Image (tube, grey):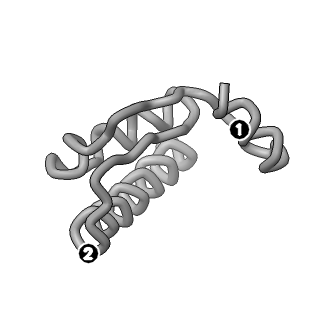
């Protein structure tokens, strides 16, 4: 049993559920998803169809531990 993989898949399901709530309750019409490649794949698999069709972009990059201003600069490019 790979506990890290199980935790990653669980986290992806939680994020997918939250995005679903945002889409349905707050009327969010578009999402750009930023995550490390492996997490991005797990999240993509967990997204409900109505959310998946609202994804307008994906960035497969790990910004963990980077200061928010640095992330903002990189995403603005």
Which residue was labeled with disc 2?
25
* Quadrant where the C terminus is found in the figure: top right
- Rendered image quadrant of residue 40: top left
Q: Position of residue 6 (x, y in %)?
A: 46, 49
Q: Residue at x 28, y 39 (%)?
A: 45
Residue in the foreground of this view, choosing between 43 and 4: 43
Q: Which mark is residue 20?
A: none
Residue in the foreground of this view, choosing between 50 and 15: 50
Mark 2 residue element: helix
Q: Residue at x 44, y 41 (%)?
A: 32
Q: Earlier in the sequence, mark 1 or mark 2?
A: 2
Q: Which mark is residue 63?
A: 1
Residue at the far bottom: name it: 25
- Looking at the image, residue 46 lies above or below residue 62: below
Gap in Å between the C-alphas at discs 1 and 2? 28 Å
Mark 1 residue element: loop
Residue in the foreground of this view, choosing between 67 and 27: 27
Q: Residue at x 26, y 75 (%)?
A: 25
Q: Are marks 1 and 2 in contact (CB under 8 Å)?
A: no
- Rendered image quadrant of residue 23: bottom left
């Amino acid at each position: 049993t790979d506990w890290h993989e199980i935790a990653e898949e669980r986290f992806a399901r939680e994020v997918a559920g939250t995005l679903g709530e945002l889409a349905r309750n707050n009327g969010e019409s578009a999402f750009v998803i930023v995550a490390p490649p492996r997490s991005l794949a797990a999240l993509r698999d967990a997204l409900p169809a109505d959310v998946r069709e609202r994804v307008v972009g994906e960035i497969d990059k790990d910004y963990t531990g980077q200061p928010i201003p640095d992330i903002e600069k990189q995403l603005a490019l």
